[in-house]
Image: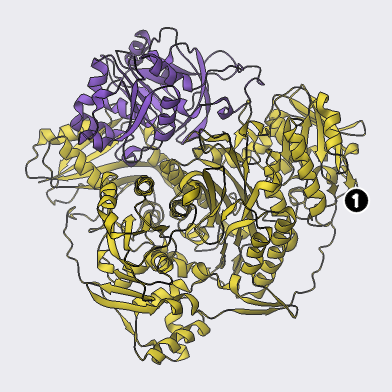
Chain colours: A purple, B yellow
Amino acid sequence: MARPKALIVFAPGTNCDEEALYCFQKAGAHADRVLVSDLFESQVDYREYQILAFPGGFSYGDCIAAGRILANYLETQLADLVREFVEKDKLVIGICNGFQTLARLGVFNADVGRITLERNESLKFECRWVRMRVPDNADTIFVRGITDIWMPIGHGEGRVLASSPAVIDSLMADGRVALQYAPHYNDGEPLYPENPNGSERAIAGLTDTTKRIFGLMPHPERFLTAGHCFVRLGTHPKIPANATLGMKVFQNAVGYFS
Amino acid sequence: MIYKIVVEKKDRQYDVTGLHLVSQIELLDIHDVEAARFAYAYYLKSDQLIPSAVYDIAGRLLADPVTETFHVEVIDGAPRNQLTPRIHELEIALNHGVTDATASQVLTAVRQMGFDCAAVKLTRLYALEGDITADQLSQIARKLLFNPVIEHIVEKGEQPFITIVQEEPRLEMLPVGKMSDEELMALSHNRLWLNLKEMRTIRDYYAAAGRDATDVEIETLAQTWSEHCSHKVFRARLVIDGQPRESFIKRIKKVTTTLNKPWCLSTFVDNSGVIEFDDNWGVCFKVETHNKPSSIEPFGGAHTGAGGVIRDIMGTGLGAKPVANTDVLCFAPPDMDWKDIPSGLLHPKRVMQQVVAGIEDYGNKMGIPTVNGGVCFSERFLGVPLVYAGSVGVIEKDCALKGQPRPGDRIVLIGGLTGRDGIHGATFSSGELTHMSETISSQSVQIGHPLVQKKALDALLDLKQERLFHAVTDCGGGGLSSSVGEMGNPGGVTVELSHVPLKYPLPFVSEYWISESQERMLFAVPSENMDLFREICRRHDVVMADIGQFTDNGKLTLRFKDKDVAVLDMEFLHEGCPHREYDLKNPTSALRPEQFLPPPTADALTEGLLKTLAHLDVCSKEPVARVYDHEVQGKTLVKPYMGGKQRGPSDGAVLKPIYDSNHGVIIANGINVRYGLIDPYRMGLSVVDEAVRQVVALGGSIDYTAILDNFSLPSPENLQTVLDLNRVVDGLCEAAMAYGLPIISGKDSFYNQFQTDNGAVIAVPPVLLVSSICVIDDVDKVIPNYIYSPQGRLYIVGLTRDELEASCYFAQTGQSGTSIPTVDLDINKNVYGRLHRAMRDGLVMTAHDCSDGGLAVAAAELVIGSDYGLEIDLARIPYEGRKRPDFVLFSESNGRLLVVVDAASASAFEATMAGVPCAQIGSIIPRNELVITDGGKKLLSLSGEKLYAAWHAPIAAII
C-alpha cells in the first residue's frame, strides 16, 4: 500500500499539532494539519485519510470543560468523521486535549457506565516524565510491541474517573486499558507523582470497543529522539539503553497500513 | 423566557476553585471562612426552548455526567430565597455591554446542537460559609472574585440581558499653549507623569501653532515621551564626578557595534534581538519586565507580561514563531508576618502564587514551553515584585529584518478587541506606586486572553507564509499610540479611530488610541493583499480591522468618523522630548564592618549547609517549574530538572527548535538581588559571568553567546539610582566586551518603589538580569548538569577567594564582611575557553555552575540529582585568602564550575586546563551522600535525601 495519510485536526487553541505532524511524517505517513472548520466546509475530504489525530492543547480555550466545545462541534457538525474511521478499519488517536475531546464524545464509555477526565488530584497542572506499562490484555495497534514506556505528561485535567467501579472493571477485563502509570524504579502500585493525576487504577490511556480509537494523557510526540529523554539513555541502571521512544506509537499506527 | 442552569461539582473534592478560594482568603488575613463552593450559571434566552431541551443542553453540553450536577431555574424577576445566615452567596457577571467570548462560544455550541437560542450569559457563583462581616465579604469579593473594570456583583432582581445604547465618545480641548507652569503640572499630575521641562516644551509647540490641543494629542505625547516608551534616563546626558560620560544606551550599544559579530542579524532596532541559528534560520530573544502591573494585580500583571513578550517575538522581523519562554521573578519572602505588610500591599505569598499562576496560564495555553527561569527573594520586593518574562523564537533568515511600511499600505489591526484595559499603563509605569495605587490604577491592569493570541499567532504564521504584509509589530505598552506611532515614523499615518473594534463602548475618543488592551498585532498591508489577508483571519477566527493608511506627509493624523481629533508632526512626537541631564558625584563608599563568627564546628558546618540550602535564593524551585509546561512543541532537550529522580537542577535549558536540524540553543539567566546594594559594579560583572558560566556548563561556547540586559531600579528622581545604574552599566559593558558577548536587546524599568501611608519608601535594590543565548552546532554534545555515573573524578575550575559579603551563607548565619565577588575577566575567559575545548574533545562527563551558596551548594545539588555521591577534600581547592572551611565551602566567587571527568580522560583534561586554576578536589562515590573532608579529616557527611529535604521544603510549602 502507498504511504498512509494522517489527518491532524486543528481547532482554535490546539497547540501540539506541529510535533504530532512531524512524528507522523517521520514515521512514514503523509500528514496534513487541517482546521476543523475546513473539514466542516468540506475544503478537505477526510475520507482520503487512514489516520485521524486529535493533538493536545486547549481547544476553544477549554470553554465549559477541556475538549467539550470541540466534542460538541464534532458531534453536531461532523458526526460522520470519527464514524468513518472506526467503521472502515482505520485509526483514531487523541492525545491529552484530544483524549479529553474523545472522552467527551463518549467513545471510551462502557456499557455499564461512563468515564470522565477530572482535575488532577493534586489540584495542579503538572509537567514531568512518567513511566507506563501496557497491560497484558491490551491489544490496540498503537501500543503493539510496547510493554514499558516513558513519556512526558503536561496537563491539569487528566484524572480518569468512572461513574461506578464496575466501569473500570469492565474496561480492564475487555483489554481497553492500553496504558497504566507505573512505579518508576520498583514494582507494586504507582504513588504520586508516579501516578501524576490520581487516575483510577492508574489509567493513562484507553481504547474504544474496536481498539482502533486510542486516547492517552501522556505525550508520545514529545519523545521523538533519545536526546529528548530526561536521562542520558544508556546511563541509568533501570532505564534500558534502547528504551522505547514515543515515536513508536506513530510508527505502529503508520505500520498498520504499510 | 430566560432559563438559568447552575452547574456544580457533585463532590467538594472536585471543586478546585472552591478549595483554592479558601486558601486565598486566608492570605487576605481573613480566617473565618470554613468552606467555599463554586458553580457556573448559564442563562439562556429563548422564546422557543422547551424545558426538556434545556435539560438536554445542560446534561449533554454544560455538565459532566460523572462529576457534576445541575439544576434549572426559570428567571421571573422574583427575589431569590433567603439563605441561611452563615452562607454568603455572591454572583459575578460581566458588566452589560462587555463582549463575552466564552458566552458566544456556548451560544454557538447550543445552536450547533439544533436549538433555538437568542443569547447566552455566563456568571460565576460563590458560596462562602463562615462567620464573616459584610466588610470582609466585600473585601473578598473585591480582591479575589471580580474585576470592577469589566465585572460586577449581580444584584437581586437584576435582569441578565440588557441592551446598552452607545453614546458618542467625547473629545476634550485643552488650552495648553496658554497654561501657566502650575496649570501644566496640575494637568501632568497622576495622568501624564511628565516633568515641567517636558510640559513647557509641549506648551511652546501649541503656543507656536496658535491652537488648543486635543486630549488625544496630549495623551499621545505623554505616552510617547513616557520613561516606559522613550527611555529618558538611558538617553540622558551624563557628567559623573566632573567627567562627561556617554549615555547608558550608547555605552551598551557600543559593545555590540565594536564586537561586530557577523552572526548578529538584528540588534536594538526591533521588538527582539535576532542571531543566526543555521544556514536557513535565525533565533530571536527578548526579555521584558512587567513589575508594577504585577504588584497591583499579580495574576493579570504576570499573565499579560508573559503574553506581551510573546507578542514581541511574534512582531519581530516579518513574524517569528515563539518556541520557548523563560521567567525570572523576585518577591518578598513568602513567610512574612502580616504585621510587616503595609496597607495597600498584597501578602508576598499571594503575589508569588498569583504571578506563577499567571505565567502558567498564558504560556501553557499558548503552547510555548517555559523552559528556564529563576526566583529570588528580598524584603525590598515587598513594594514592587519583579516579573521578568522572556521569550525565544525562530525566524527564517530572510524574514529577520524589520519590515518597512510603504505609503498607501493599509494599517491593519488584528486579534484582541479594545477596551479600557491598561489606560495609562505606560505613563503609570513611569511613576511611583503608593498605598492609593490599588484603587487609582486598577484600570491600568490589562486582562489577558491567551486563546485570542494563540489564534492571532496561527493567523500570523499563515499570513507570513503568503507574504501578505510589508511590516508587523505588536501593540504593547502605549497601545496603538506607540505601535502605530513607531511604525509610521517618519513617514506618517492617517488613522480612523472609529474603525477600532471594541469590547464595549468607550467614553473618550482618546481611549481608543491609548488603550493597552492585549493580544493585538499591527500590520502594514498593501491594498491588493487585503482580500486574502481578510480570508486568512476569518479561517482562524481572528478579528481584523482596517484602521487607516500609511502616508508620506510626516504627520500623525487621527480621525474619528472623518473628523480630525489629532494632528501632530512625527518629528515633534518622536524627537521633541527634551533630553535629561545628570551631573552627579559618586559618594565615597564605606566598607561594611567585618562580623565573623568563630570557625564553625563540624555540627555547625552541617547546620550551615542545610540552612544555606534552604535560603530562598538557593532552594529548589521545582514546584514552580512543574506547573509550567516545559515540553510542549517537543523541542526541549535539557529541562529544568534532570536525571533519574528528575530533581537535579539544570544550569540552563537546551532546545532543538528545528526538528530536522541538529543545531541547538542554550538559554540561561544571571541575576543577583543581594550584591547590588553594596557594590552595583561587581553585581553587573557577576551576573554577566553567571549567565555565561551556565552556558559553558551545558557545553556552549562563549564565542557564540549573546546576551540581553534588563534593569529594574527605583525612581531616577533619587540621584543615587542613576549613580548605581552608572556602575551597573560599567560592570555589564566591561564584562560583555571582555568576553565578546554582543548585547542584542534589553529593557529598563524605573520607579520600582512603593510609598506607604506613613511616607516610608520601599524600593527595590538595583537589579540587572542578564539573559544569555548560545547557538550550538550539535545537540548531542550537550553536557549534563547531573551525575549519571558511579565513578569519576571531581574537579573545580576557577579560583575561590574570600568573597562572602552578602552571600547566602552569611545571610543565614548573620555574618558580614569580606567583599562582593569580583570577576577576573582574563582568567575566566581563558577558563571557559579551555573548558569548552575539553568538552568538545569529549573529556567531560558532567559540569555544574557554582553560584548562590557557593561550591557546597553546587556539590549538594549534584548529589541531590543523582543516585551516587561525592567526596570532596577542601584542602585541595585552589584558594586565595583566609582558608576557613566555611569560607571555602560557601564563598560565592565567580568563574567556577564543578566538573566530573572519567579517570581515563583525566590526564588529557588536566593537560587541556594547564595554566588556568583547576584542581581535582575529590571523586564520585557509590553511596548517595555528600562527604566533605579537610586534608583527610572528615568535616561533614549528609545523605542525598537529607540534602533534598532541606533544599526542597521552602517552595513546596507555597506552590
In terms of image quadrants, where is residue A112? top left
Identify which residue, A105 or B152, lies in the foreground: A105
**Residue A23 shown left or right of residue B466 in the figure:** right
The spot of residue B904 in percent (x, y) is: 82, 24
The spot of residue B449 in percent (x, y) is: 36, 50
The spot of residue B215 in percent (x, y) is: 35, 78
- Look at the image and tell me whether residue B676 can be seen: no
- The crowd level at tag 1 (other Cα within 10 Å; few <14, some 14-19, many 20+) is few
**Above-or-below relation of B536 to B203:** above
Question: Residue at the spot x=66%, y=67% of the render?
Answer: B251
Tally the marks: 1
Identify which residue, B877 or B591, lies in the foreground: B877
Q: Chain of mark 1?
A: B
SS for callout 1:
loop
Residue type highlighted by circle 1: Gly
In terms of image quadrants, where is residue B490? bottom left
In terms of image quadrants, where is residue B521? bottom left
Which residue does the numbered mark 1 point to in the structure image?
Answer: B881
